[in-house]
Amino acid sequence: MCNFLSALIFGPKLELKFGRFYSDPLTTNSHTDLEVKLGLVDRHADPEWAKVEYTPGPEKGLADFDGYVFKIDETITPDWLSEDLIEEFKVYAKAKLADIIITSGTHDLIDTPKKAICGSARIGSVCGSARIGSVLDSARIGSVLDSANIDSVYGSANIDSVCGSARIGSVLDSANIGSVYGSAIVIITDGSPAFKLREGCSALVVDRRTNPQTIYGEFQAFMKPKRVKKEESNA
């Protein structure tokens, strides 16, 4: 199983064609996918590229780039993969991480995809069609709006408001969602997160900690008849 961050390191025969390193962490962490994208199919006993990973340390987390662990995902390490080249790859990987993981500082606007917002980062708004993998630690976001999408919010992270047609796939731990309105959708999956649903809007908060799940919001009144009608038709 491949892990974040997965990459390829190229030997001297392929370096001129592909550069020394290749990864696409916002799209895939599969070495096979990376090889297919570049048309790499011919593997030898001493291959001309090596599959590697640079993963968060078990106790450090996403925000501590220096705590990441390097791993060669090969049965046999190629002769050309030197310690100097590995150290050069780590510099490359940290630069890649810094581009897709926001760990600190204050940022007015995020409108491009990111792997995570974590650490002590402060974000004014996540908007447009931006997609964020996770918001965690003590990170704080002022607003999530437009058609932005956040896969998960956990730890003690805080989001002041979710609106427009924004969607948050999973909220857990002690995360806090200040206000949900517009046609936004927020899904709670675990822990004891807090949220406030504004009245007079079509927003929904779905609590999957209960069985069956609990739906909060005025729009739920239009959902229940459809569900009952479907059950009757199958009876």
Image (tube, rainbow, N blue to C red):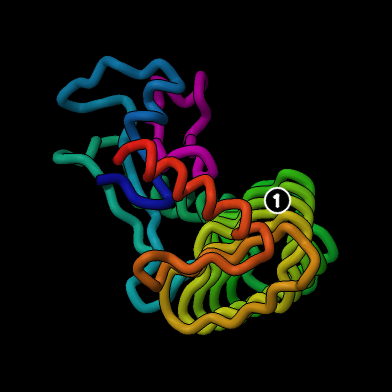
Residue at 54%, 44% in the rendered image:
26
Give the residues in magenta. Answer: 7-29
The image shows residue 22, relative to residue 221, as above or below, that is above
Residue at (52, 45) in percent of width and height: 226
Q: For the C terminus, which image quadrant?
A: top left
Q: Position of residue 170 (x, y in %)?
A: 50, 63
From the image, tell me which residue sits under label 1. Answer: 148
Q: Is residue 122 visible?
A: no
Does the magenta-highlighted stretch encompass residue 229?
A: no
Query: Residue 145, located in which quarter of the rendered image?
Result: bottom right
Q: Nearer the viewer, residue 222 or 86?
A: 222
Q: Is 190 located above or below residue 34 in the figure? A: below
In percent of width and height, residue 167 lies at 63, 55
Residue in front for this viewpoint, 230 or 4: 230
Q: Position of residue 35 (x, y in %)?
A: 37, 25
Q: Is residue 124 visible?
A: yes
User: How many residues crowd around disc 1 within 10 Å: few (fewer than 14), some, or many (20 or more)?
Assistant: many
Q: Quadrant of residue 150?
A: bottom right
The residue shown at (24%, 36%) is: 79
* On screen, residue 205 above or below 33: below
Between 180 and 120, the one nearer to me in the picture: 180
Q: Secondary structure at mark 1?
A: loop
Q: Amino acid at mark 1?
A: Ala
Is 188 on the left or on the right of 110, as rendered?
left
Q: Is residue 84 left or right of residue 142?
A: left
Determine whether, in the image, residue 111 is placed left or right of residue 137: right
**Side of 52 where 1 appears, left or right:** left
Q: Give x and y (percent) for residue 148.
A: 70, 51
Decide which of 12, 19 is in the foreground and name it: 19
Q: How many marks?
A: 1
